[in-house]
Image (spheres, grey):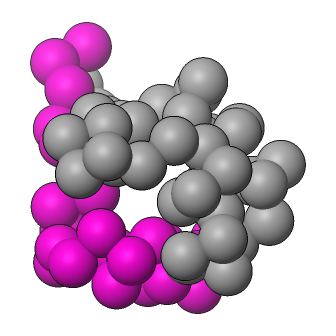
């Protein structure tokens, strides 16, 4: 049996804990608002690595803190 680990982003939760909304996170991270909106509403959205890095920097967290493992 093939064992695949599934991850989802927790960017929405991290951002809200720090007082960000979609628009403010987009401005601070310099990631297009459409991209932020997509990952905000779809935690499995395929977010490019450069966007992950900019969001992590804006939230002052490690890139590894942006996602969590999900039991499927």
Q: Quadrant of the N terminus?
A: top left
Residue 10 shown left or right of residue 22 in the figure: left
Percent position of residue 30, x then y: 67, 80
In reply to whether residue 8 is colored magenta, the answer given is no
Task: Please tell me which residue lies in front, 23 or 65.
Answer: 23
What number of labels is visible? 0
Residue at (48%, 32%) from the top-left corner? 43
Along the viewing direction, whichever of 58 and 10 lies nearer the viewer? 58
Q: Residue visible at 51% across and 41% down?
A: 21
- The image quadrant that residue 64 belongs to is bottom left
Task: Determine if residue 8 is in view.
Answer: yes
x 17%, y 74%: residue? 61
- Residue 56 inside the magenta-drawn segment: yes
Judged left or right of residue 4, residue 30 is right
* Magenta stretch in the rendered image: 47-72
Query: Which image quadrant for residue 47?
Result: bottom right
Q: Quadrant of the C terminus?
A: top left
Residue 7 visible within the image? no
Residue 69 picture location, percent across and down: 17, 38
Image-based side of 51 in relation to 4, left or right: right
Foreground of the two, 13 or 71: 13
Residue placed furthest toward the top: 72
The location of residue 17, given as percent across then percent down, is: 20, 41
Residue at x 58%, y 57% (from the top left corner): 24
């Amino acid at each position: 049996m093939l064992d695949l680990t599934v991850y989802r982003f927790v960017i929405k939760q991290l951002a809200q804990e720090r007082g960000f909304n979609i628009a403010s996170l987009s401005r601070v991270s310099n990631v297009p608002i459409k991209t932020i909106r997509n990952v905000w509403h779809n935690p499995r959205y395929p977010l490019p690595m450069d966007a992950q890095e900019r969001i992590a920097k804006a939230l002052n967290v490690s890139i590894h803190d942006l996602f969590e493992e999900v039991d499927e």
